[in-house]
Image (cartoon, coloured by chain):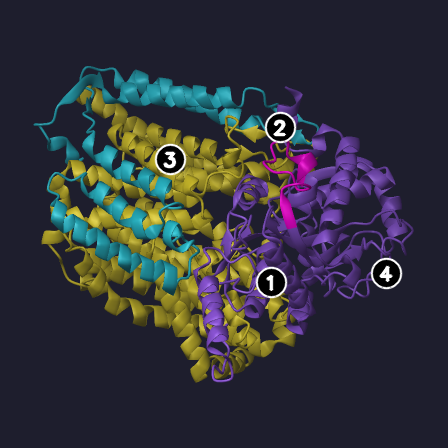
Chain colours: A yellow, B purple, C cyan
């Protein structure tokens, strides 16, 4: 314990220099900005800023890049809450209740609780990294592809709970999402799948294209049709911060979300993506009145936001200790580290204690700065909602177009987004929900890859999913979740049948 | 353009000089390279930001931009396994304001692995030169029961399908390297396919798979500290690479035919005016001499090419040689090695 | 569901879920057609066809169930589709895609904003025109100069 304290002191000594604080602030600010802009992701920004960091010492450079990463995570939630456009997979869940809250005039409360939940989660996750990074080093390696496959199946099952309406339609949407994720060249054989001979989409469809189409554009089309609901947004603006009762409601979800996120962030291959979904599911199941979820329940924002941030933070553990980047941003961080002649791996802690502990201290400082930057911004964002909708939506359209174009500097992506906007409009009319579709899309690719890896490793023996105890346990759990989810639905179905 | 001092000149000469200056200024497009570049140059990278290709491009963009006195802005145009960006590069206006990035995968192997490649690497480009080379390497998990290449090969032969080798997808350089290596030692391992090295290395470290075939640029961070074992550095000249001085080459290990060095280079679309092309090539060469560039390349796991392998003409020759070479490898490996095996069967 | 109280809207004389189920079946059929040649298994275990084919068949099955459940006379009717919104909003997006590389952000931006703005019956053309110019100028500053994205500005004029 004393050693930990010494280390943390060392870390703060490194991070608190004026220059590093400035870099941390700059990173968080840029991150928030690009996070708020739909489509402009941290990957593109970090790689653009990489050359600028050559001039800075390695610690400063990494502190700034890490700041961009958290900033983008947080900024993405802002857009999801305000205009229902999830910029990243992890903010899909935030959009569900967060945007509903904004429409009820509670945007300030939603943004505020997201900031507070994230800060709390970030603080805890930083302590987890500081205290447990070394013992947890090998955790990521315990997961065999078979286990990972089972985790993905379980995750997809959880997606069912995201649905407000029909269970069967939610399952159908998940599967359509999975189908969508198989578009492009097959990784193993190189066969084109569902491209219908169109080689432009050989590399698959970008998440932002689908999300902005079925969420963002479809939301605009819905609002244009129902002027009654959209006016609510600009007339009533409640308090800028969550009230006491909302804080009490959010406390436990934040705690649980933090735990979940911290755990899932340790997994290889971006397990953190599951964290907000899992948190939402748990909160909805635990709630006294689950029907509030999807209608503006603050727990549905607090829990997933905490989970998201905790996961984003602990994802640094496999990176720092094993040199395994769990996602594209982390891969870029490895690049940044090697360019500064730092080799991530177990030795980094012993050989570069200043860097390691400095970064950990800066993570916490970064989280603090995000709160400092974002709480005052809440007022500004909420005021933005007062812009008349007839001007607001063309602006959203333009920002989305620019964002999507900048994903691949390719007009094709913009056309595709328009097409997905039409799909989203159709989904609304047919009362299908887009959130399960997006989760299926995100997890589908991993699901298939892990399945095929596990089967290749076991040389075609399907018992591998039973032999791996973790996998077997999770598949059994999936089965239980399915039954638990299906029972009330079946009962309700019967009741309505009798009533009708 | 104007002489510094008019007083020493006759009136006539002064007028002539003025006229000359005006005509230069009014010329619609400067034919000479003196005026070039007048604005930012775009460098098309056919992959998403963040990978080794992107990082090396940004290092070159920065160094060359400094020499030219104009920014070179990297534009990531991902899609179709590099085909989308390559096509945009091919079709760009050949005015020197658009250049592009090419590597062994996009501009040599792709001819054989991608039946729908929208450009011909041997004809459609004016190459500026290779800027980075990185040899390929075989790596295994730490507790793999072999210490030398000979033992590796022995073990592979004994295990056959029991040997589990990871690669990064059909037609990827990692996959092609595996194909070459196992063709040469006459073994058919079980392939386990991952999306990128980040995922592959996880399962090598955990021991779920035995090893992979990769570029040193990707693996160096794990080979150096001994987290994985390195075998058979596939350098062309059989000499050890400064990137991994402690790992024996394939020649030392008794498999001198296993030679694969990845190259990364730049091109301009075909038809750039000769003075501008010359200036770009000269700038590229100058950037390679910059010690800061050399150091950054070392840090990302590559080296600048040897003097005789530099320059645009040499790059074209290497492209042509590699197109032929990979065609042979893919042909020998059968349809499974190329992308779109089912499509090809139709 | 808040949108159901709109009595004044026309609706189609078909049950919504019947259409929903049929759309799923059609999607599944199209998907299956797109992967019909891919093998379900291959020497390494699972072929490229297994997952998409299984998923497509399941989607079709679910589609049929949804059709079945949607038939009762009490089922909700399919809401009417409006033309104006999708046409102008998505049209603006497509227009942006078509013009960004030739006209650049300086022109494609205002164009997209103005066309999108027409989607609203309350739109005021003059206000919209001014707004589109101001907003585009803001975006040029933000994306082109602050974030330094390689987005074309006015290629026909400046060459980039």
Q: Is residue A324 a member of the stretch shown in magenta?
A: no
SS under mark 2: loop
Point out residue B245 in the picture as x, y percentages from the top left corner: 81, 66
* The C terminus of chain A - image quarter: top left
Query: Residue C123 or A271: which is nearer the viewer?
Result: C123
* Parent chain of label 4: B
Q: Residue B60 has which mark?
A: 1
The reply to whether the C-beta atoms of the residues labelled 3 and 2 are less than 8 Å apart is: no
Q: Do the residues marked 4 and 3 share a common chain? A: no
Q: Are marks 4 and 3 in contact (CB under 8 Å)?
A: no
Mark 3 or 2, which is nearer the eye?
A: 2
The residue labelled by disc 4 is B239
Q: CA distance from mark 4 to mark 2?
A: 41 Å
| Up-down relation of residue B238 to residue C96 (above or below) | below
Provide the residue designation for mark 2.
C47
For marks 4 and 3, give the CA distance: 64 Å
Quarter residue B157 falls in: top right
Quadrant of res B31: bottom right
Tell me, yes or no, whether dots 1 and 4 are on the same chain: yes
Task: Tell me the CA gap for discs 3 and 2.
Answer: 33 Å
Q: Are marks 1 and 3 on the same chain?
A: no
Q: Which residues are magenta?
A: B110-126
Residue A28 visible somewhere in the drawing: yes
Mark 1 vs mark 2: tell me if same chain.
no
Residue in front for this viewpoint, A19 or B113: B113
Looking at the rendered structure, the number of numbered marks drawn on it comes to 4
> Residue at coordinates 14% horizontally, 42% vertically from top-left?
A229
């Amino acid at each position: 314990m004393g050693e930990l304290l010494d280390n943390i002191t060392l870390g703060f000594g490194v991070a608190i220099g004026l220059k590093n604080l400035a870099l941390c602030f700059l990173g968080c600010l840029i991150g928030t900005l690009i996070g708020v802009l739909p489509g402009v992701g941290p990957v593109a920004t970090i790689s653009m800023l990489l050359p600028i960091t050559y001039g800075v010492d390695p610690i400063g450079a990494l502190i700034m890049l890490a700041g961009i990463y958290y900033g983008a995570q947080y900024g993405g939630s802002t857009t999801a809450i305000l205009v229902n456009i999830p910029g990243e997979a992890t903010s899909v869940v935030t959009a569900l209740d967060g945007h509903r809250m904004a429409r009820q005039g509670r945007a300030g409360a939603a943004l505020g609780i997201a900031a507070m939940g994230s800060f709390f989660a970030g603080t805890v996750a930083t302590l987890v990294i500081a205290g447990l990074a070394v013992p947890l080093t090998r955790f990521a390696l315990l997961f065999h592809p078979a286990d990972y496959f089972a985790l993905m199946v379980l995750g997809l099952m959880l997606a069912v709970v995201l649905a407000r309406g029909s269970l069967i339609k939610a399952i159908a949407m998940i599967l359509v999402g999975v189908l969508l994720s198989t578009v492009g060249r097959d990784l193993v054989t190189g066969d084109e799948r569902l491209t219908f001979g169109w080689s432009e989409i050989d590399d698959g469809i970008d998440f932002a294209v689908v999300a902005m189409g079925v969420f963002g554009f479809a939301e605009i089309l819905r609002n244009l049709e129902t002027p009654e609901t959209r006016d609510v947004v600009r007339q009533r603006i409640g308090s800028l911060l969550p009230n006491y009762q909302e804080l009490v409601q959010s406390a436990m979800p934040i705690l649980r979300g933090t735990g979940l996120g911290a755990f899932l962030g340790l997994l290889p291959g971006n397990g953190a993506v599951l964290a907000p979904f899992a948190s939402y599911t748990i909160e909805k199941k635990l709630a006294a009145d689950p029907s509030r979820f999807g209608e503006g329940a603050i727990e549905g924002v607090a829990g997933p936001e905490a989970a998201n941030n905790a996961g984003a933070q602990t994802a640094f553990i496999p990176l720092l200790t094993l040199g395994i980047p769990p996602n594209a941003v982390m891969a870029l961080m490895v690049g940044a580290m090697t360019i500064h002649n730092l080799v991530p791996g177990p030795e980094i802690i012993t050989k570069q204690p200043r860097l390691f502990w400095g970064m950990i201290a800066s993570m916490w400082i970064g989280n603090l700065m995000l709160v400092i930057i974002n709480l005052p911004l809440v007022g500004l964002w909420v005021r933005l909602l007062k812009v008349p909708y007839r001007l607001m939506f063309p602006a959203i359209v333009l920002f989305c177009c620019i964002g999507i174009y900048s994903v691949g500097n390719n007009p094709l992506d913009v056309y595709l987004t328009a097409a997905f906007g039409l799909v989203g409009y159709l989904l609304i009319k047919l009362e299908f929900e887009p959130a399960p579709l997006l989760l299926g899309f995100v997890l589908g690719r991993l699901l298939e890859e892990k399945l095929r890896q596990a089967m290749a490793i076991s040389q075609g023996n399907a018992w591998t999913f039973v032999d791996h105890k973790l996998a077997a346990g999770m598949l059994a759990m999936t089965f239980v979740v399915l039954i638990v989810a299906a029972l009330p639905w079946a009962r309700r179905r019967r009741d309505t049948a009798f009533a009708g | 353009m104007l002489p510094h001092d008019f007083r020493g000149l006759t009136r006539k000469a002064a007028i002539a000089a003025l006229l000359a200056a005006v005509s230069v200024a009014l010329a619609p497009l400067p034919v000479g390279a003196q005026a070039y570049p007048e604005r930012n140059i775009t460098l098309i990278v056919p992959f998403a930001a963040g990978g080794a290709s992107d990082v090396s491009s940004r290092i070159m963009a920065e160094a060359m931009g400094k020499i030219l006195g104009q920014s070179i802005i990297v534009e990531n145009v991902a899609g179709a396994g590099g085909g989308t960006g390559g096509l945009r590069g091919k079709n760009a206006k050949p005015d020197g304001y658009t250049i592009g990035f090419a590597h062994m995968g996009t501009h040599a192997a792709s001819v054989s692995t991608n039946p729908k490649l929208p450009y011909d690497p041997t004809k459609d480009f004016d190459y500026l030169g290779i800027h980075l080379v990185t040899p390929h390497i075989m790596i295994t998990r730490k507790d793999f029961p072999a210490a030398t290449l000979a033992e590796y090969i022995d073990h592979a032969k004994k295990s056959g399908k029991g040997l589990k080798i990871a690669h990064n997808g059909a037609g990827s350089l990692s996959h092609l390297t595996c194909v070459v290596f196992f063709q040469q030692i006459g073994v058919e391992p079980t392939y386990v396919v991952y999306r990128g090295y980040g995922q592959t290395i996880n399962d090598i470290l955990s021991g779920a798979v035995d090893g992979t075939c990769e570029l040193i640029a990707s693996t160096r961070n794990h080979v150096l500290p001994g987290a994985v074992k390195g075998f058979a550095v596939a350098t062309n000249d059989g000499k050890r690479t400064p990137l991994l001085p402690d790992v024996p080459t394939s020649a030392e290990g008794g498999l001198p035919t296993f030679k694969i060095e990845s190259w990364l280079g730049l091109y301009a679309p075909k038809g750039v005016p000769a003075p501008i092309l010359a200036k770009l090539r000269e700038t590229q060469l100058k950037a390679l001499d910059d010690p800061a560039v050399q150091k950054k390349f070392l840090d990302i796991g590559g080296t600048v090419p040897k003097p005789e392998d530099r320059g645009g003409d040499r790059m074209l020759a290497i492209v042509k040689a590699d197109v032929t070479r990979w065609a042979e490898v893919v042909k020998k490996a059968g349809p499974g090695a190329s992308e779109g095996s089912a499509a090809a069967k139709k | 569901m808040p949108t159901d109280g709109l009595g004044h809207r026309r609706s189609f004389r078909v049950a919504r879920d019947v259409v929903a189920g049929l759309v799923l079946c059609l999607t599944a059929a199209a998907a299956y057609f797109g992967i019909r040649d891919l093998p379900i298994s291959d020497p390494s275990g699972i072929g490229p066809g297994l997952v998409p084919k299984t998923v497509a068949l399941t989607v079709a099955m679910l589609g049929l169930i949804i059709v079945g459940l949607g038939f009762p006379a009490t089922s909700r009717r399919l809401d009417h589709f409006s033309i104006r919104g999708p046409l102008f909003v998505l049209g603006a997006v497509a227009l942006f895609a078509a013009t960004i590389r030739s006209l650049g952000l300086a022109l494609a931006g205002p164009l997209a904003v103005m066309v999108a703005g027409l989607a609203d019956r309350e739109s005021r053309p003059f206000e919209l025109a001014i707004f589109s110019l101001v907003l585009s100028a803001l975006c040029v500053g933000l994306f082109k100069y602050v974030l330094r994205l390689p987005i074309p500005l006015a290629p026909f004029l400046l060459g980039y």
